[in-house]
Image (spheres, rainbow, N blue to C red):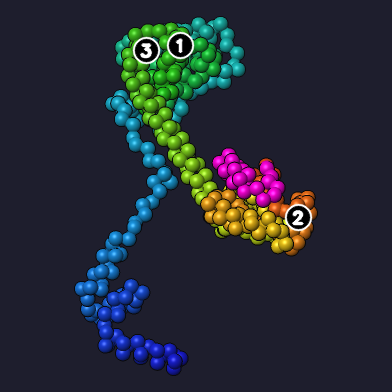
Amino acid sequence: MMDPNQVAELRKFVEQLKSNPSILNDPSLIFFKDYLRSLGAQVPKFENTERDYEDKAETKPRFSPKHDDDEIMESDVELDNSDVVEPDNDEPPQPMVDPSVEVTEENRDAAQSEKSKAMGAISQGKFDEAIDHLTKAIMLNPTSAILYATRATVFILVKKPNAAIRDSNVALQFNPDSAKGYKARGMARAMLGQWEEAAADLHVASKLDYDEEMELALKKVEPNAKRIEEHRKKYQRLRKEKELQRAERERREQQEAQEREAKAALKDGQVISIHSISELEVKTKAAKKASRLVILYFTATWCGPCRYMSPLYSTLATQHPRVVFLKVDIDEANDVAASWNISSVPTFCFMRDGKQVDKVVGADKGSLEQKIAQHSSSK
């Protein structure tokens, strides 16, 4: 059961609603109004209340998300992929032979014969037959780079780029200066749309043994490779800019947090009384973190010149809110005075980054103002 006092309060509230239904349009009761509507209740609108509230709600400042936190979405690169083919991933790998097998002179001659047959088949457009002859030649002479490179060129003709790349890789293992191996691999990579890798292979091949077919291939490959490179550099630059923006925002947020922390701990525009060494350490550390100048004013109640300087010191605190004005009564906090070797009052010690940078001894109003101006603007 509900508490009788709560029931009485609720009954009183309902009676108020009966006499003045516009109470429902108070912004603090919007949750209750929504609940009534969810039960099917008809809640009347009042022109100068609910509409005003809705208008105010519409004009509340809306904060857009920080776009520099969003991940960069790369656009697609416009490429000419008209000659790209489906990869021959379903094809079983072509036969390879253990290269450590000893090759006799007789096998070399037989391999050369099979290669000749393959070249004849190629000239007749019988590419599968050419592959069979070249495979036999490789079986007979598995260390011949030219045989693998030649079979790679035939795989290109039958649109089997992955097979061509496998043969080209073997050819380049046996002969790192095989122009035919680089050319075949570059053309095969172009067929797979691997434009940058294709361009790199074809450029190496052109330096080793240039021909017109290679020139035509480069004219096809280079524009796409260049677009990809420009696209990559563009987004590398954008990511770098984003990182710099993020770093700057984090630095700014950290600085603002330090400022808030300092403002809470250092009471901008006010003179802060220090009663112990530990209290002084807290304030100086906060000032150091916020890169604030600190002035430590040593005074005493019996000191006549101090009574003259204290009102000025308070005024200077209001004029320089970014400077931390501390005050130590040497009789009340004699441990602080002793740690600073104070022998006379008033004494004003200036600190920056936890270290003393200057000092004014005596009721010298001009020197105090001059040194505050000097040190407060030095950083």
Q: Quarter of the image for the N terminus: give it.
A: bottom left
Residue nearer the viewer, 322 or 286: 322
Residue nearer the viewer, 208 or 173: 208
Residue 359 falls in image quadrant: top right
Characterize the local packing of mark 1: few (<14), some (14-19) or many (20 or more) Cα atoms within 10 angstroms: many
The earlier-in-sequence mark between 1 and 3 is 1
Q: Is residue 129 visible?
A: no
**209 drawn magenta:** no
Query: In x, y percent, where is residue 108?
Result: 52, 8
Real-space Cα distance between discs 1 and 3?
10 Å
Which residue lies under the disc numbered 1? 179
Q: Is residue 177 visible?
A: yes
| Horizontal side, residue 106 vs residue 128: left or right | right
- In the displayed orientation, state which residue is furthest to the left: 47
Residue nearer the viewer, 312 or 242: 312
Which residue lies under the disc numbered 3? 214
The earlier-in-sequence mark between 1 and 2 is 1
Q: Quarter of the image for the C terminus: give it.
A: top right
Query: In x, y percent, where is residue 200?
Result: 44, 19
Real-space Cα distance between discs 1 and 2?
86 Å
Question: Does the CB distance between marks 1 and 3 fall below 8 Å?
Answer: no
The residue range painted magenta reads: 358-379
Query: In x, y percent, where is residue 137?
Result: 47, 13
Does residue 11 lie above or below 79 as drawn? below
Kindly report which numbered mark, 1 or 2, lies closer to the viewer in this rendering. 2
